[in-house]
Amino acid sequence: MKSQNLKTNNQNTPSVIFRPEVAEGKGQNGPTLAEIRQRAFEIHIERGGIHGCDLDDWVQAERELKGKYNQSSDESSIPK
């Protein structure tokens, strides 16, 4: 079986997570990639910096941030 060779940036972060070629524009209905990346890193640190859980951290960050966006969107749609 062939091992996967990940490209890394100068901080030695896998390009799977650090993708500068992907637009970082503001998401209209959800968080930006930069916001998800930041939260995933925070989760990684909270976990004790244990490697090998990056996908779990990313999915958890997406879930949390999308929940926040949905909640704020729901609140703003309530007529006053």
Image (cartoon, rainbow, N blue to C red):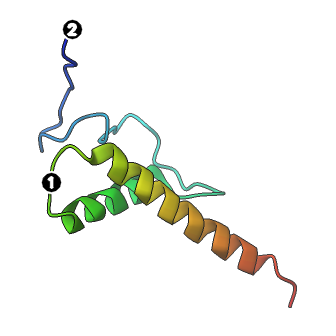
Secondary structure at numbered mark 1: loop
Label of residue 79 in the image: none
Type of amino acid under label 2 = Met
Which residue is rendered at x = 82% and y = 81% of the image?
78
Chain-order first, disc 2 or disc 1: 2
10 Å crowding of disc 1: few (<14), some (14-19), many (20+): few
**Please, is residue 74 above or below residue 48 in the view?**
below
Q: Residue at x 73, y 80 (%)?
A: 75
x and y percentages locating residue 10 in the rendered image: 12, 39
**In the image, is residue 61 above or below residue 4?**
below
Q: Position of residue 46 (x, y in %)?
A: 22, 68
Residue 9 location, x and y as percent? 17, 36
* Residue shown at 27% from the left, 34% from the top: 15
Q: Quadrant of the N terminus?
A: top left
Give the spatial CA distance, label 2 vs label 1: 26 Å
Q: Secondary structure at mark 2?
A: loop
Where residue 44 appears, as percent x and y from the top left, is 24, 59
The residue most toward the front is: 1
Q: Is label 2 in contact with label 1 (beta carbons under 8 Å)?
A: no
Choose between 13 and 25: the one closer to the eye: 13
Q: Nearer the viewer, residue 39 or 60?
A: 60
**Amino acid at pointer 1:** Ile
In this view, the residue farthest toward the top is 1
Identify the image quadrant of the C terminus.
Answer: bottom right
* Residue at the spot 22% in from the left edge and 19% down from the top edge: 4
Residue corresponding to mark 2: 1
The tag on residue 50 is 1
* 14 sits to left or right of 36: left
Answer few, some or many: residues within 10 Å of disc 2's Cα (few below 14, many 20 plus, some between 14 and 19). Answer: few
Left or right side of 21 for 1:
left
